[in-house]
Image (tube, coloured by chain):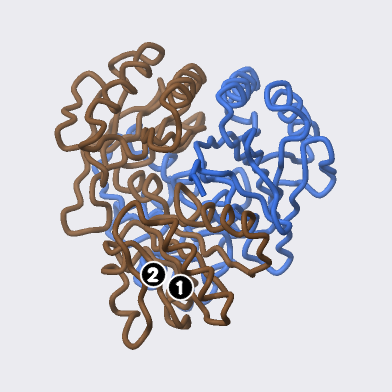
Chain colours: A brown, B blue
C-alpha cells in the first residue's frame, strides 16, 4: 500500500493520529529532505528515500516502484498532501503507467488553515487558494484567477507568494487585487507556522512590507468586510448580533 | 482562556493532538448537540453547554461569559473552526462587547480536505470554497462568486450544497458552473466523511444524481483538466512526465 501523508504545518501537535499511524507502520518513508527532518522520530530502522527540491517526480516514481514490490510506503508532504502536494503527482504517474496500485491519501492541515488560526478567523466567508508559482502554471492563468477572485470579493489565500526567482509576484498579485478591493483591504501574513520562528502580521495591502515574505509564508487577503480586532483579523459571516 | 476547536471531519483519527489536549484540559465544553456526541469521551466530569441548531450566538455568548469568569472553555466546531465555523462569530461578539478575552483557535481538517483525500487529489490546482447557504449571504453574492470562480476555472468546493429549505441550490450552482466549464466536468461527492456511513461518488455535472446530496455532503467540482483514474478524481498540477 502507498500512503500519501500530509504532515500538517510543521508541529507534531497538528499532525493527525491517522498520519502518525501511517508513519509508524510503513516500511519506507519517502520525502524531500526538509520534510524527512520533521518525521525523524518515526524513522528508526526504516528505509528512507530522500532527495532535494525539484526531484519530486523521481521520489514519487521510486515510491510507486517500492509499493508495487509489496512494501508499505509513505510519501510525505507538509500541510495537506492533496493541496499543491504529492497526491496529484502520484495519481498522474499511476495513470501514465496504467498502474492499479492501491493508494490512501491521509489528509493534513494546510498552511492557510494553520495560518488562519494564528491570524484570527479570516476564512469565515467564501475564499480561494491561488499559488503564485509560475513554474507549472503560466502567469496568464494566475493573472486571470487573481482578477476573478478579486472581482468575486473572495478572501484570497496566496501560496508560494515570493521566492528568489520571482521576487515581484506578490506585489503584482496585490496590485491586481487592490484594483477591485482597494488598498485598505486587510492582509494577514503567517510565516513558519507551527515552527519555532513562527510569526504573524496583520496589516493592509497599502502598508504591507513584503520583505519578510518568502516561500515559507502564507498570505491571506481579506474581503471588503474583513476587520481587525485585538491585533487579529476576522471576516464577518453575517450574523445579526 | 477560550479555545475554539476544530474537530476535523468526524473520526478521532483526524482530530489533531492540539485539539485533543484542549478538550482534555478545559473545564467546560460548549457546542451544538451533534458535535458534543463526537467528543463524549472527553466530557467525563466536565460542564457541558449544548444547544440545538441555529442557537450558535447564545452558545458563543455563554462560552465568552464563562471564560471571562476565569474558566477554561472549549467551543467546538466540526471540520475547521475558522471555516464557516465558530471562530469568526466569537470574534464578532468580542468586538461588539469590546472584550479583551484571550482566545486560541485550534485548526482542524475541513470537509473539503477530508473529502478530497477520499476522492483522490482534486485540489492540486487553484481552488475556491463557496457556501450555497443563503441564510446569511444573499443569493446575488453567491451567484456572483459562482460566476467568478467558474470563469477563473477554479476547482470549486461547495459547502452546504442542499437542504430541505433550499432543495434547488446545488442544481442552480451547477447550471452556472457548467456554462463556463461544460457539463462533462468531473464532480466528486463526499458524504458523512470519517463516519460509518461515509460514501464517495465520482461523476460528471451531467450525470450527477443529486438525491444523495444533503447538508452532510461536500461537493467538489473539478477544473477543465480534472481527470478520473481508477474511480478517483485528480487535477493535474502541470508536471512533464
Q: Is residue B76 above or below residue A148?
A: below
**Residue annotated with mark 1:** A17
Residue B66's x, y, as percent? 36, 55
Q: Nearer the viewer, residue A144 or B128?
A: A144
**Residue annotated with mark 2:** B17
For the question of whether residue B57 can be seen, the reply is no
Disc 1 packing (10 Å; few <14; some 14–19; many ≥20): some
Disc 2 packing (10 Å; few <14; some 14–19; many ≥20): some
Residue B171's x, y, as percent? 78, 31
Residue A131's x, y, as percent? 40, 36
Quadrant of res B178: top right
Tell me if label 1 and label 2 are in contact, CB under 8 Å. Answer: yes
Q: Is residue A98 above or below residue B205?
A: below
Is residue B79 rendered to the left or right of residue B143?
Answer: left
Q: Are marks 1 and 2 on the same chain?
A: no
Please report the residue visible at 43 percent of the width from the left and 81 percent of the height from the top. A24
Which of the chains bears the disc numbered 1? A
Which of the chains bears the disc numbered 2? B
Please report the residue visible at 46 percent of the width from the left and 18 percent of the height from the top. A147
Is residue B193 rendered to the left or right of residue A208?
Answer: right
Disc 2 secondary structure class: helix
Q: Is residue A150 above or below residue A36?
A: above
Eye-nearest disc, 1 or 2: 1
Is residue B231 rendered to the left or right of residue B130?
Answer: right
Please report the residue visible at 80 percent of the width from the left and 31 percent of the height from the top. B168
Disc 1 secondary structure class: helix
For the question of whether residue A206 can be seen, the reply is yes
For the N terminus of chain A, the image quarter is bottom right
Amino acid at each position: 500500500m502507498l500512503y500519501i501523508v500530509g504532515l500538517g504545518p510543521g508541529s507534531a501537535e497538528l499532525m493527525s493520529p491517522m498520519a502518525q499511524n501511517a508513519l509508524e507502520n510503513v516500511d519506507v518513508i519517502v520525502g524531500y529532505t526538509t520534510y524527512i527532518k520533521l518525521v525523524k522520530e518515526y524513522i528508526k530502522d526504516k528505509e528512507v528515500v530522500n532527495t532535494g527540491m525539484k526531484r519530486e517526480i523521481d521520489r514519487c516514481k521510486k515510491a510507486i516502484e517500492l509499493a508495487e514490490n509489496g512494501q508499505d510506503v509513505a510519501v510525505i508532504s507538509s500541510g495537506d498532501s492533496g493541496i499543491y502536494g504529492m497526491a496529484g503527482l502520484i495519481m498522474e504517474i499511476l495513470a501514465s503507467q496504467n498502474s492499479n496500485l492501491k493508494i490512501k491519501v491521509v489528509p493534513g492541515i494546510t498552511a492557510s488553515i494553520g495560518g488562519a488560526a494564528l491570524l484570527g478567523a479570516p476564512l469565515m466567508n467564501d475564499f480561494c487558494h491561488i499559488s503564485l508559482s509560475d513554474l507549472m502554471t503560466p502567469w496568464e492563468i494566475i493573472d486571470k484567477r487573481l482578477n476573478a477572485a478579486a472581482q468575486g470579493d473572495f478572501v484570497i489565500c496566496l501560496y508560494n507568494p515570493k521566492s528568489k526567482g520571482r521576487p515581484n509576484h506578490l506585489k503584482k498579485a496585490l496590485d491586481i487585487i487592490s484594483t477591485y478591493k482597494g488598498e485598505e483591504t486587510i492582509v494577514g501574513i503567517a510565516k513558519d507556522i507551527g515552527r519555532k520562528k513562527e510569526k504573524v502580521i496583520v496589516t493592509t495591502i497599502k502598508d504591507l512590507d513584503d520583505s519578510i515574505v518568502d516561500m515559507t509564508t502564507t498570505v491571506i487577503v481579506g474581503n471588503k468586510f474583513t476587520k481587525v480586532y485585538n491585533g487579529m483579523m476576522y471576516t464577518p459571516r453575517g450574523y445579526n448580533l
